[in-house]
Amino acid sequence: QSFVEREIDLVITTGGTGISPRDCMPEATLSVSARQVPGIAETIRAESLKSTKYAMLSRAVAVVAGKTLIINFPGSTQGVRECFEVIRKILPHSIRQIKGNQDH
């Protein structure tokens, strides 16, 4: 049973978002997605640039697959913490929207 069939609200991946030959997480994420949510990835990159110049090398994406929000994070523990703080406050609203709640 896939995560979409199980009605999982959120999947956060870590690692594989850079530009090395082995980094393929964005492609894998896009392969299961119906729609991209570029503002999430763009905001994460913008905020991450405040901590590291290497954030500009991130190819991370955020997508909707079924009723699941999937967000790519960097592989470092520090990066995961920082990125989660960027999106933490929008997660409940995002998940409600994906599930069809139109309240604003």
Image: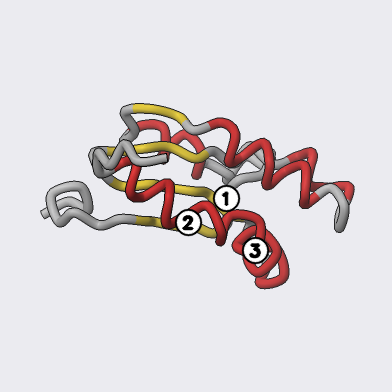
Mark 2 is surrounded, within 10 Å at the Cα level, by few (under 14), some (14 to 19) or many (20 or more) other residues, namely some
Outermost residue, front direction?
104
The residue that label 3 is drawn on is 85
Badge 1 amino acid: Gly
| Residue 68, position as x, y percentages in the image | 30, 47
Three-letter amino acid code of the residue under disc 2: Thr
For the rendered model, the colour scheme is secondary structure
Label 3 or label 1, whichever lies nearer to me, is: 3
Q: In the rendered view of the protein, which quadrant contains the C terminus? A: top left
Mark 1, secondary structure of its residue: loop
Residue at mark 1? 16
Q: In the image, 51: left or right of 29?
A: right
Viewer-proximal residue among 6 and 58 = 6
Q: Are marks 2 and 1 in contact (CB under 8 Å)?
A: yes
- Mark 3 crowdedness (10 Å alpha carbons): few <14, some 14-19, many ≥20: few
Residue at screen point 72% across, 43% down: 45
N-terminal-most mark, 3 or 1: 1
* Residue hosting label 2: 13
In which quarter of the view is residue 10 placed?
bottom left
Residue 59 screen position, x and y as percent: 63, 37
Question: Residue at left 36%, top 37%?
Answer: 64
Label 2 and label 1: CA atoms lie apart by 9 Å
